[in-house]
Image (cartoon, grey):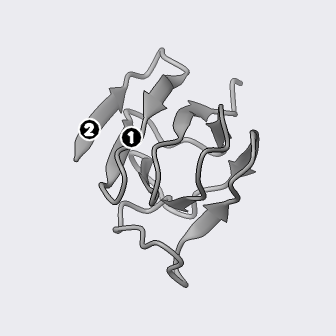
Amino acid sequence: MADHVIAQNEIGAHEITLVANVVETFTFAADVETVEILSHDGAAPIYVTLDGSAPAVKGPSSFVLPAAMGSSVLQPRTSGRTVVRLISTGNPVVSVMRADLS
């Protein structure tokens, strides 16, 4: 498992290759209103939680990005530091960014 800390003045962590079946954690130093998760290559589906809980492959409490190039913008329902966690059965390349730049 790898941890990425995104400082108050930073936008995100970019071009991170997920390791199959290993949770990757992205912690924003601030309460972020919207988060964008970008799949650079669409190599495999990506399962996401926004509240710090563990994501699960095909889990009913996880958001999913399909195995396709593209992105999703999601709104965390928590306050305080925003913690985004990802898991995949493959090795997709992802970026996790704040989408609220105000």
Rendered position, 3 above or below 20: above
- Give coordinates of residue 20: x percent, y percent: 37, 53
Residue at position x 34%, y 45% in the image? 19
Q: Which residue lies furthest to the top in this view?
A: 9
Q: How crowded is mark 1: few (under 14 residues within 10 Å), some or many (20 or more)?
A: many
- Give coordinates of residue 68: x percent, y percent: 74, 48
Q: Quadrant of the C terminus?
A: top right
Rendered position, 25 above or below 62: above
Can you identify the residue that label 2 sits on? Answer: 3
Q: Which residue lies furthest to the bottom in this view?
A: 60
Mark number, residue 39 = none
Residue at position x 61%, y 67% in the image? 63
- Nearer to the camera, 55 or 30: 55
Pointers 1 and 2 in contact (C-beta within 8 Å): yes
- Give coordinates of residue 67: x percent, y percent: 68, 54
Rendered position, 6 above or below 68: above
- Give coordinates of residue 94: x percent, y percent: 55, 35
Q: Is residue 18 left or right of residue 74?
A: left
Rendered position, 48 above or below 39: below
Amino acid type, label 2: Asp
Q: Helix or strand or loop: what does disc 2 sit on?
A: strand
Can you identify the residue that label 1 sits on? Answer: 26
Q: In this view, does 77 lie to the left or right of 75?
A: left
